Amino acid sequence: MEQNSTFQNQLEMAKKMIEQGRDNASIESYFNQQGLDENTVVQIIKQVKRLRNAKLTKQGSLLILSGVVILGIGFISCILIHYNGGSIGFSLYGLTAIGLVLLVIGLAMIFH
């Protein structure tokens, strides 16, 4: 029971180090300097990687959603503007470009 709470404390310390912007190598060296056994350090680094991936997945998903919404707005506005006799240049090219850029960046964040 005490080992579990100690491991949780170490994970909390690793989360704080992630928030400070430290990379995986510096986090691993910190815990090695603390005298932890190799198995515990490997488990902590696995959790650190999982936390980083979860954050990137969340941000990437939001970017993908934003890109899809902008693409949809561009599509609908092209149809409406065309039937009203206006110029669809911005809707066709501008909104499509913005939506695609957001979509590609979001996908890159998820699958990196």
Image (cartoon, helix red, strand yellow):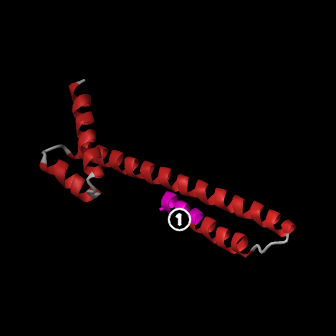
* Residue 75 in magenta stretch: no
Q: Residue at x 53, y 60 (%)?
A: 106
* Residue 108 in magenta stretch: yes
- Left or right of residue 71, residue 25 in this image: left
Q: Residue at x 22, y 47 (%)?
A: 38
Quadrant containing the N terminus is: top left
Magenta stretch prevailing secondary structure: helix
Residue lying at the far top of the rendered structure: 1
State the image coordinates of residue 57 (x, y, percent, origin top left).
Answer: 49, 52
State the image coordinates of residue 67 (x, y, percent, origin top left).
Answer: 61, 60
State the image coordinates of residue 95 (x, y, percent, origin top left).
Answer: 66, 68
Total number of numbered labels?
A: 1
Report the span colored magenta. Answer: 102-112
State the image coordinates of residue 91 (x, y, percent, origin top left).
Answer: 71, 69
Question: Toward which corner of the image does residue 22 lie, by quadrant?
Answer: bottom left
Q: Residue at x 30, y 44 (%)?
A: 43
Local crowd size for mark 1, using a 10 Å CA cut-off: few (<14), some (14–19), many (≥20): some
Seen from the viewer's position, the closer of residues 65 and 78 is 78
Label 1: state its secondary structure: helix
Q: Relative to residue 10, is residue 87 depicted above or below? A: below
- Left or right of residue 92, residue 60 in this image: left
The residue under label 1 is which amino acid type? Ile
Seen from the viewer's position, the closer of residues 84 and 94 is 84
Seen from the viewer's position, the closer of residues 91 and 45 is 91
The residue beneath circle 1 is 105
